[in-house]
Amino acid sequence: MPGAGSAQDEEGTGEGVQELLCGVFDCSPDLAAQIFMRGRLRDFPVRTAIVRQGDRISTLYIIAAGRAHAIVYSLDGQIVLLHEYLSGDFFGVVSPPYSAIHDADVVAVDDVSSFLLDGSVLALLAEQHGCIGLALLRAMVDRLQQTQSRMYEHVALSAVGRVHAELLRRARQSPDLAIRPVPVVADLALQVATTRETASRAVNALERRGIIRRDADRLIVVAPHRLEELIL
């Protein structure tokens, strides 16, 4: 069963979560401490449903550690990945009326530690501290842009092209164009809405052509311009 408790009782984790909140809300340590005292920590074991599609929720969930996927199912039973949530990402209620029906299952891909903040508390804090509202707005705009980019890719690119685009996107997040850890092919396929076999063939072909190189703990894009040319 997921573990729950007040944030105040988790002193060993508290400092790390407060530091995370500083980054999430672009706020001072003092304000992060106030937010921390108003929320609670909760852990979800791997493969646990954090939120189910159709649940009525009134809480903001902030991922403190681990990874979670927001998924829906197509009419033919295929899993469709809507979002991947990593440390510092959040989902749930972020705007009035602070209670809503959730539109997807959110499942813990790893063991997840999260910080929960009631929507009514979030509303009060956002009214009192402009940085919180601005941070929520920026995050929502970024997520919308990511969603639009993925929608374009699904319409305009082949399945293999989407694999190439995702690898390049992940590599460009690191100065050395390295993806750490090495992507799991099944996760990569889910990310771009294709089959595991298609993703595996695309990655293997890139390796054979010397465009990417696999090390023990990372996948390096050796020739980013050549990879970009293959995004079709």
Image (cartoon, rainbow, N blue to C red):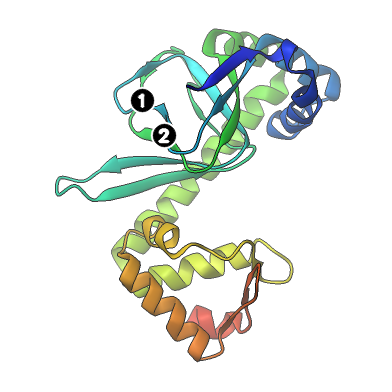
Q: Give the vertical position of 208 relative to 113 (above or below).
A: below
Image spot of residue 182 (x, y percent): 58, 66
Classed neighbour count for the residue bearing mark 1: other residues with Cα under 10 Å, few (<14), some (14–19), many (≥20)? some
Q: Residue at x 34, y 33 (%)?
A: 104
Classed neighbour count for the residue bearing mark 2: other residues with Cα under 10 Å, few (<14), some (14–19), many (≥20)? many
Image spot of residue 92 (x, y percent): 47, 25
Foreground mark, 1 or 2, reads: 2
Q: Amino acid at mark 2?
A: Val
Q: Residue at x 83, y 25 (%)?
A: 28
In this image, 144 relative to 100: left or right? Answer: right
Is residue 64 something one can see in this rendering?
yes
In the image as oriented, which residue stretches furthest toward the left? 76
Q: Amino acid at mark 1?
A: His
Image spot of residue 189 (x, y percent): 38, 62
In this image, 94 relative to 40: left or right? Answer: left
Q: Give the vertical position of 65 relative to 195 (above or below).
A: above
The alpha-carbon separation of the residues under discs 1 and 2 comes to 9 Å
Disc marking residue 106: 2
The residue tagged 1 is 102
In this image, 175 relative to 41: left or right? Answer: right
